[in-house]
Image (cartoon, grey):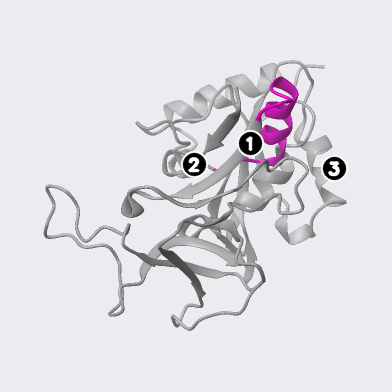
């Protein structure tokens, strides 16, 4: 196999390392695309493994332009995180069988993706988060993808998803759902101690919840909407199942 290309979700450092262990001679290429672009918007040329651009989703495909804007839709310079806007012939004009709906474009035809990220000086795109998944903890911004990327490298973590949950003190706080690999004994305390030397304290998850699997949407992506409902509803069936599973993962 020559190439593994992924455009359905974020390729964490932990997953890239695992893929490279299994397929040492295969190039791994992150891709950034949306339904509204009908195809990839960016492609990572070559192999992300060992590249000084690791963490990037690549460069825009021919015929597509990318700009980063702030909340007032003003362009931002290279390196500053903001909303990702796209423009080009691949951006759709309407939705099939929903012609009354239109993509979120401005008067010049720029499409707002709903994602946050930045461009470097050479035009490489770095995705930071979905706008709706960013966590505002007392005014401090926390990107769920950043936390997921770091947690994915902890030994024994097979999969992880981070979501915002309401907080009476800070407005929102991060909660991490972790799927263990079944080969290691994991505890919230050990993971939090490990995180404290890697990230600022305000980014630490308020809770870590262990589970056998993460809920999925019909196309296989992690359903963060369902995880949000679970974290806010302790009496839910999924939450009760998680509590019983935590006893398994915390056994000495």
Q: Is residue 197 visible?
A: yes
Q: Nearer the viewer, residue 233 or 155?
A: 155
**Disc 1 element:** strand
Q: Is residue 180 left or right of residue 136?
A: right
C-alpha span from label 3 to label 2: 30 Å
Q: Earlier in the sequence, mark 1 or mark 2?
A: 2
Which mark, residue 194?
3
Q: Is residue 87 above or below residue 73?
A: above
The residue that appears at 49% across and 69% down in the rendered structure is 83
For marks 3 and 2 on the same chain, the one whose residue lies earlier in the sequence: 2
Q: Looking at the picture, tell me which residue is in the foreground, 96 or 148.
A: 96
Find numbered disc 3 in the image and state the secondary structure of the residue it sits on.
helix
Work out which quarter of the rendered image holds the N terminus and state it: top right
Residue at 60%, 52% (x, y): give it: 144
- For residue 40, side relative to residue 46 (left or right): left
The residue tagged 1 is 28
Q: Up-down: is 130 above or below 121?
A: above
Residue of label 2 = 7
User: Which of pointers 1 and 3 lies earlier in the amino acid sequence?
Assistant: 1
Q: How many marks?
A: 3
Task: Give the extent of the magenta segment.
Answer: 10-26
């Amino acid at each position: 196999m020559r190439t593994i290309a992924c455009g359905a979700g974020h390729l964490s450092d932990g997953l890239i390392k695992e893929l490279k262990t299994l397929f040492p001679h295969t190039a791994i290429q992150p891709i950034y695309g949306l339904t509204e672009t009908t195809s990839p918007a960016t492609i990572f040329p070559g192999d992300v493994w060992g590249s000084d651009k690791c963490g990037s989703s690549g460069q825009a495909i021919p015929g597509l332009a990318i700009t980063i804007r702030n909340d007032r839709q003003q362009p931002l310079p290279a390196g500053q995180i903001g909303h990702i806007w796209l423009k080009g012939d691949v951006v759709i004009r309407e939705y099939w069988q929903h012609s009354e709906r239109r993509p979120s474009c401005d008067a010049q035809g720029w499409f707002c993706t709903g994602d946050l990220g930045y461009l470097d000086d050479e035009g490489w795109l770095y995705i930071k988060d979905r706008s709706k998944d960013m966590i505002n903890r007392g005014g401090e911004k926390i990107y769920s993808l950043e936390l997921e990327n770091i947690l994915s490298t902890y030994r024994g973590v097979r999969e992880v998803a981070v979501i915002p949950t309401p907080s009476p003190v800070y407005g929102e706080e991060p909660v991490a759902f972790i799927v263990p690999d079944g080969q290691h004994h994991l505890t919230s305390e050990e993971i939090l101690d490990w995180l404290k030397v890697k990230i600022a304290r305000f980014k630490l998850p308020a809770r870590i919840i262990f589970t056998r699997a993460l809920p999925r949407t019909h196309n296989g992506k992690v359903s963060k909407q369902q995880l949000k409902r679970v974290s806010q509803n302790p009496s839910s069936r999924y939450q009760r199942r998680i509590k019983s599973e935590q006893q398994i993962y915390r056994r000495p």
